[in-house]
Image: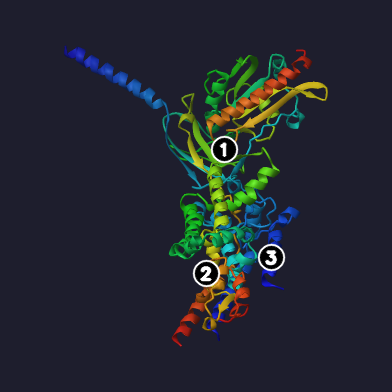
Amino acid sequence: MNKMLTVQITLLVLIAGALGGMLLYTDVYDDIKSTIVDITCFSCIKMDPVTRIDFTFKTVDNQNHPGFILENLLEGPVFLAFREDVCGGCDKMEPIIQKIFNTYFEKEDFVYETINYSGTPVVFYHISLDHASDEMIEPFFVYDKDQRSGVPMFVMITLGDNKGQIQPYYATAYSTLGLEKNSKREALMREIIKQGIEYYNQNQEGYNYTV
Amino acid sequence: MKKTVIYFLIISLLIIGLLSNSVTAQPTVEEITFDPSGPVPLSTITFTANISGDNVSEVYITVIECKGDLCFFPKINESMAKIDNDTYQADVALNHDDADNIGYWLVIRSDGTWYDFQDSAEELDLSTTSDNGNGKSTNGTPGFELILILGAITLIMFYRKKRE
Amino acid sequence: MKLQIKRWIAQIIFLISANLGALGLKTGFCYPFFYCHSCPAAASACPLRAIEIGVFRGNWNWRFIFYPVLIIGFVGVIFGRAVCGWACPIGLLQRVTGVVPRYLKKKFPSIKKLGKSKIDRYLRYIKYFVFIGLVVGTTIWIGFMFTDLCPVGFLVGTIPISILHPGEYVPNEFFYVALAVFILFLVLIFTVERGWCRYFCPVGAMLAPFNKISLVHISVDKSKCVNCNICSDICPMGIDVPNMNRDPECILCGKCVESCPENLIKLEKRYKT
């Protein structure tokens, strides 16, 4: 028999058998589909998705806004920074928050301060889930928009126009904001605060809350 | 002169004795071991701690689960049972399927005082299945054994043809 | 029907079938040719990506390594490197851009001389280094992958996605280097006919050895050759056709078959040696 033909047929049978075996008995087809074809390959397109933060009116499970938040909104937009004692991401973000708000505190400290952020008063809270009171921990569950139950968690609560009614409007950011560099994290954080202030200035007049 | 020296020595010994007492009053964590050695998310880890110190009344182990820079709330606090003179053990069940590392440390009550060892917290990476494979074991891969067998046959055939 | 027209049809059919993802068809196959799954319309996965994931930083996922190799092997044993000539969309691209180097070759005979020089022969080995070095090697030990720079990913992935989703993406660390590689790629395919296939294509590197044993191959009856050299001139891969015997560079396009005035070259579909 022709030597070349032998090689060709043998190889063909080998490969077809192995390939058929792989397709039938392993989940390589599904794996390839789900891990390569179905997803957007960021390294292949050499681009990363832009991290977006969205404002919303809807709280988790439609819980009520805590009274002290509604009260503080009379003064200015409210910024909440939650952390736990032992938390790598919290340690990374803490200096950035301290720099942005020009205030210093230890990780266990409860901070409640009205900060002058470029002319606008922003009510700043730093809440440690390990040390703060239940009343201060409550907003952690109300504003955990993506329901991650994780720290660090940052909430920018401002005012928005919900079909004629001025209501609390908030955005939640988690962890290191999906960014690798401190400069980018600071820039995104400032962007969120700037948005919050803009919304607040637009809607402040229509906000009615009686203590 | 001799009497003053003896008095001085006795008093120093007493003071040293008192001091060493208060020094040993703070318990020390000798070692914390865990099993299994490469835990996966949602598994149960058995922590064994060696603690030296007198009057240790309660020992808790605190575990925090994290995914990258995001750490989950609330932490796990498990009471540890005394299984030996200085050894305490607890089973900790992890709760988050997307956690990729945990931090753990002890909180010990000795002589009525709580000592929190979170400053010397240790970290442990969880073995997650690689983000490519799904961890499903391939139940039999006839394809590969087939390659080897048929490859061997091909080689044998080749050598036979060569000799002819 | 003329062979070249059949080839156009085949190439267009494969181009469309590679992009059936636009109609919602997403499969778990690997392309046996060079195309990128980051194309929004892609229906299958790039074989190189599957291999890279299989060896990434020593994470030996054997299924991901064998699967694309077996697919390419299966196609290779039957068709050899005809995949390059008849199916690969990048081959189609170079067929279209190939008119420019052909024109340059006619106008500047010095370029023709360069093509026949020894350098060209040695440059052909680069694609094997690209495959073993960048696709397999650096992925195992460093984690850097060929697909981080791949110009085809740039062409069919980055550009369409930037157009379809403006403002939703920012360049990552490899973007500008990949852009430079892409520009070089464009320069290459407009100056050297099938330049990518000749010198750099890692999938071509995988398919090339199969030419030696493939069922479909080109046979030349050298004994009756009149040395007119029309076949070598017209060959897009710059092969010395009369002297070739299952050359690993041959993409089985059939141009030599049609151009030989003595009809000495045949596209064999049977098992003759």
Q: Amino acid at mark 1?
A: Glu
Same chain for marks 1 and 3?
Answer: no
Residue A124: image x %, image y %? 62, 19
Split into 4 quadrants, where in the image is the N terminus of chain C?
A: bottom right
To which residue does mark 2 refer?
C239
Marks 3 and 2 in Cβ contact (< 8 Å): no
3D distance between C-alphas at marks 1 and 3: 58 Å
Q: Which numbered marker is on residue C103? A: none
Q: Residue at x 65, y 23 (%)?
A: A194
To which residue does mark 3 refer?
C8
Residue C15: image x %, image y %? 68, 60
3D distance between C-alphas at marks 2 and 1: 62 Å
To which residue does mark 1 refer?
B65
Q: Residue at x 54, y 46 (%)?
A: C180
Chain letter for mark 1: B
Q: Secondary structure at mark 3?
A: helix
